Image (tube, grey):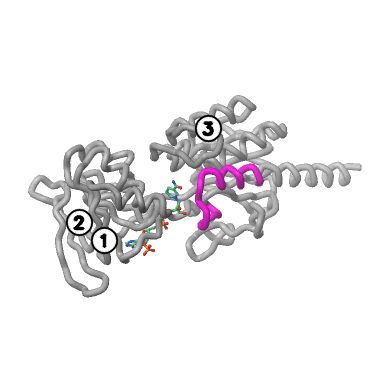
Amino acid sequence: MTTHRTRMLIIGSGPAGYSAAIYGARAGMEPIVVQGLQPGGQLTITTDVENYPGFADVIQGPWLMEQMQAQAEHVGTRMMWDTIVEVDLDGGSPFRAIGDSGDEYVGDVLVIATGAQAKWLGVPGEQELGGKGVSACATCDGFFYRGRKVAVIGGGNTAVEEALYLTNHSDDVTLIHRRDELRSEKILQERLFKSDKISTLWNKTVERFVAGENGALAKLELVDTVTGEKSELAVDGAFVAIGHAPSTELFKGKLPMDDGGYLLVEPGTPKTAIPGVFACGDVMDHTYRQAVTAAGTGCMAALDAERFLATLEFAEKEAAE
Ligand code: NDP
């Protein structure tokens, strides 16, 4: 077991974690980023990004994250290919964390940027057919359904984007939504309704994912949310796009959370209930959840971390005199 000591320990490697690292490194805090299971975070499983400021042309999500990582490294961040499995926040700063590798990480401040992950419907067949027709990422798996019939479940930005993306591979895409109105941005809705490759099924939920003789997904059993009427839809692929849940399992019982499991912070700041522990990005933001807002709160976490350390060091100096 190796112990890695730093002034600033960052858990998570999306836009929030990398932005905290960039600011932290430039402030001399020599950050360590423990990257987790999905280095780069959710943007690594998207394609086109056209709403991150600074790029007049469309850029790719994975490329953007590579750039952020490289930028953080160039200014002095240490990247660790490890996943934190345990944290000890008792007793205040310094904070300790244990990695899957068995290594220990100790930081005078802790920045939590663990993000969020896709939600599942939790209905029969969904888990069993994961990777055999059922997926939560069209940009990762859409390619496998070239020329085949696919469905997307959900009515938010993710669902509409996934449906539009799938038209690159399939001429037969069905969007299934539990209401008769989408919650996605109007510009995306316009693109969706304009596409002659996408049809919509309103007021329907999936009750069961059903396999065919080959063991792969063959159809969806649907129920109408208004009439209760049952129906079926034959598909080769189904993409669940019903939102995300924050990755906060590690902090249960250690930090206050809301009912959805999002970390609670002092309003308008990234400060958690424990001085020296900061939360930024999707793990504390269920409202905006954008790369640019995650990056913004990552920056705020680093600035507040710097202030916290300055106060801590001042107090230590006073005590020593
Ligand atoms: P959202 O929470 O916005 O939407 C989830 C959708 O899934 C809703 O339409 C919801 O229905 C539906 N849903 C939820 N649970 C179920 C269920 N059990 N059964 C059936 N349907 C269900 O999540 P998104 O992932 O779409 O977006 C998350 C955030 O990320 C948003 O703020 C979004 O704007 C942002 N985003 C931005 C993008 C961009 O700017 N390019 C791209 C992707 C996401 P209902 O409407 O009835 O609640």
Q: At x 29% / y 49%, what residue is drawn?
A: 194
* Left or right of 277 in this view: 314: right
Whether the residue under disc 2 has CB within 8 Å of ligand 1: no
Q: Amino acid at mark 1?
A: Val
Q: Amino acid at mark 2?
A: Phe
Position of the C terminus, as image quadrant, is top right
- Estimate the x, y position of residue 74 in percent, counting from the top left: 60, 25
Residue ranking furthest to the top: 74
Q: At x 64% / y 27%, what residue is drawn?
A: 75
* Residue on which the image places disc 1: 123
Numbered circle sitting on residue 80: 3
Q: Amino acid at mark 3?
A: Met
Give the mark toward the camera: 3 or 1: 1
Spatial CA span between label 2 and label 1: 8 Å
Spatial CA span between label 3 and label 1: 36 Å
* Residue on which the image places disc 2: 209
Dot 3 or dot 1: first in sequence order is: 3
Secondary element type, mark 1: loop
The residue lying toward the viewer, choosing from 141 and 114, is 141
Is residue 5 visible in this depiction of the protein? Answer: no
Secondary element type, mark 2: strand
Taking the magenta stretch, the answer to whether it contains residue 42 is no
Q: At x 66% / y 32%, what residue is drawn?
A: 25
